[in-house]
């Protein structure tokens, strides 16, 4: 297979200086021409590239068989970084988001535009959500991969989480922030590859059930009545029920949607009639991120809190709301982040 691929590539490069391959959503684009219905081998190749955070590969004239062979071997070894190849260049692109490129030369000063564009894409996906329409996950995996690449370059994770400028934008901004914080936590614990991406996607969709709650309740300017709180608490069930229907979605998504308010001591909601039911560890990670970001946002009934205030408050909830080991890790990395500011 490797020899055949090299022969085809070599033949193409006799007539041009480079061959560009891009992955846009679930399509393989070769020199700007989409290849569709190319079978299971192409689908597996796309998955392998995405696991490595790669969505663009340029093969340059002069590429050798040994380079191709080594590149394929390195792709398979997910616990190691890719080497430098004289005639193979890799990077990350995002066509849906205005062509902003995230690669080795990514300029951190572009972060405000980068994050706002990711939020706009989340907003597009959320606006299409309906019980009568299949979930469109196009773009979500690209957002997750882009953020993984970017927070590895950013000097400070707080650079990547956006302030909420208006309540109407809260849902999308909060979803994006929770995804970034959850992936950052997970990677600090040694999580990599497909599981890291799945946690990011699940976190992006953790509050999707709120789209099925009336705006009159969600945007009420004042204390909620008990029956209104009961309806708010239903969002975990609504979200899990909706996400379970999506065949091409990570199975973590409905679990996290259901459990992110369950609490470490199982005293939250929803009340599950299952003996000794405990939160999935990924739900525990998202719950920490969810609380931290929610406290940073101004609400009709309270002011936003400073980071140090939030961390102090979270300490009091170790062992009850939050897994103490995960919380210790989160507090540690956030304290280090504050010192770097």
Image (cartoon, rainbow, N blue to C red):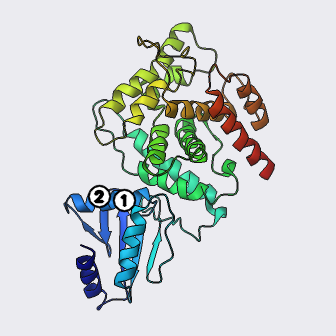
In this view, 77 is above or below 265: below
Between 216 and 256, the one nearer to me in the picture? 256
Between 300 and 135, the one nearer to me in the picture? 135
Between 153 and 227, the one nearer to me in the picture? 153
Estimate the spatial distance between the alpha carbons at disc 2 and disc 1, rounded to whole Å: 6 Å
Residue 132 as seen in the image, left or right of residue 154:
left
In this view, 134 is above or below 270: below
Residue at figure coordinates x 47%, y 79% from the top left = 85
x, y percentage for residue 169?
56, 39
Residue 212 figure quarter: top left
Mark 1 Cα shell of 10 Å, populated few (<14), some (14-19), many (≥20): some
- Mark 2 lies on residue: 44
Residue 314 as seen in the image, left or right of residue 227:
right
Q: Residue furthest bottom?
A: 14
The local secondary structure at tag 1 comes to: helix
Residue 266 as seen in the image, left or right of residue 160:
left
Marks 2 and 1 in Cβ contact (< 8 Å) = yes
x, y percentage for residue 15?
29, 91
- One can see residue 341 in this view: no
Quarter of the image where the N terminus is located: bottom left
In this view, 293 is above or below 102: above
Between 336 and 137, the one nearer to me in the picture? 336
x, y percentage for residue 47?
35, 56
- Mark 1 lies on residue: 48
Residue at figure coordinates x 42%, y 29% from the top left = 255
- One can see residue 203 in this view: yes
The local secondary structure at tag 2 comes to: helix
Report the disc number at residue 333. Answer: none
x, y percentage for residue 229?
54, 13
Residue at figure coordinates x 46%, y 48% from the top left = 197
């Amino acid at each position: 297979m490797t020899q055949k691929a090299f022969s085809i590539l070599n033949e193409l490069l006799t007539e041009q200086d480079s061959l560009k391959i891009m992955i846009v959503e679930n399509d393989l684009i070769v020199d700007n021409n989409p290849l569709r219905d190319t079978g299971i081998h192409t689908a597996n190749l796309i998955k392998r590239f995405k696991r490595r955070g790669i969505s663009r590969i340029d093969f340059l004239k002069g590429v050798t068989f040994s380079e191709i062979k080594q590149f394929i071997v390195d792709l398979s070894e997910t616990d190691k970084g890719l080497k430098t190849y004289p005639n193979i260049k890799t990077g990350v692109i995002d066509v849906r988001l205005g062509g902003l490129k995230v690669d080795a030369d990514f300029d951190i000063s572009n972060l405000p535009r980068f994050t706002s564009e990711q939020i706009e894409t989340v907003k597009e996906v959320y606006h299409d959500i309906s019980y009568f329409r299949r979930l469109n996950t196009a773009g979500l995996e690209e957002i997750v991969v882009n953020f993984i690449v970017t927070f590895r370059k950013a000097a400070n994770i707080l650079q990547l989480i956006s302030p909420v400028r208006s309540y109407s934008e809260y849902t999308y901004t909060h979803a994006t922030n929770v995804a970034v914080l959850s992936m950052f936590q997970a990677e600090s614990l040694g999580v990599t590859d497909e599981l890291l991406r799945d946690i990011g996607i699940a976190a992006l969709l953790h509050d999707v059930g709120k789209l099925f709650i009336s705006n009159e309740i969600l945007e009420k300017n004042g204390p909620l009545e008990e029956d209104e709180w009961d309806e708010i608490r239903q969002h975990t069930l609504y979200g899990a029920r909706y996400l379970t229907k999506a065949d091409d979605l990570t199975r973590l998504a409905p679990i996290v949607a259901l459990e992110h308010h369950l609490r470490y001591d199982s005293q939250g909601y929803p009340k599950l009639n299952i003996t000794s039911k405990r939160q999935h560890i990924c739900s525990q990670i998202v719950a920490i991120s969810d609380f931290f970001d929610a406290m940073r946002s101004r609400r009709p009934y309270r002011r936003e809190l400073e980071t140090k205030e939030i961390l102090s408050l979270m300490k009091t909830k170790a062992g009850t709301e939050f897994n103490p080991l995960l919380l210790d890790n989160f507090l540690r990395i956030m304290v280090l982040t504050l010192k770097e500011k």
